[in-house]
Image (cartoon, helix red, strand yellow):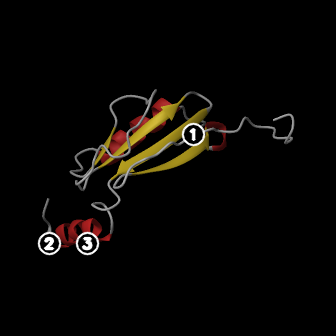
Amino acid sequence: MHVTGLTVKPLFCPIVDDYYNGLATTVTLHNNSLVGNPTAESIRQILVEHYKGQKFVTVAPELGSGTLECNWGANTDNMEITVSGNNEQTIITARFDNLGKGAAGAAVQNMNIMLGLD
């Protein structure tokens, strides 16, 4: 902050990878810039409610606090959202198999929606 002149602490999200079919997409947030100044836990709860009952998307049952393996869902069409952070900063990471959850998986999910199938 001193060298760059930043007035808000930066969010750091180091990534080390060695996976063929897995992807982690991460969004970093400063909570005080969001409506209502939510916490990481309240953001997680909002996502839990939003995705409740979804077959292919789940939200991790608690705040993340360690390593996320990006190839955990290899050869599936599933996605897991993990929320990490505290009262000031939040990191949201969606993990999925980029081969399974790509265009082909999206096409099948859209077809299911259009046909009224689970």
Residue under the point 87% across and 38% down: 3
Residue 17: percent from the left, percent from the top? 46, 46
Left-right relation of 74 to 67 = left
In whole angstroms, how far apart are the C-alphas of marks 3 and 2?
12 Å
Q: Is residue 107 above or below residue 39?
A: below
Residue under the point 53% across and 43% down: 15
What residue is pinned by disc 2? 115
Label 1 element class:
loop
Q: Along the polypeptide, which appears first: circle 3 or circle 2?
A: 3
Of badges 1 and 3, the one in the foreground is: 1
Of badges 3 and 2, the one in the foreground is: 3
* Amino acid type, residue under disc 3 in the picture: Ala
Q: Along the polypeptide, which appears first: circle 1 or circle 3?
A: 1
Label 2 element class:
helix
* Amino acid type, residue under disc 1 in the picture: Pro
- Pointer 3 local density, CA inside 10 Å: few below 14, some 14–19, many at least 20: few
What residue is pinned by disc 3? 107
In whole angstroms, how far apart are the C-alphas of marks 1 and 3?
32 Å
Residue 2: percent from the left, percent from the top? 86, 34
Residue under the point 27% across and 47% down: 73
* Amino acid type, residue under disc 2 in the picture: Leu
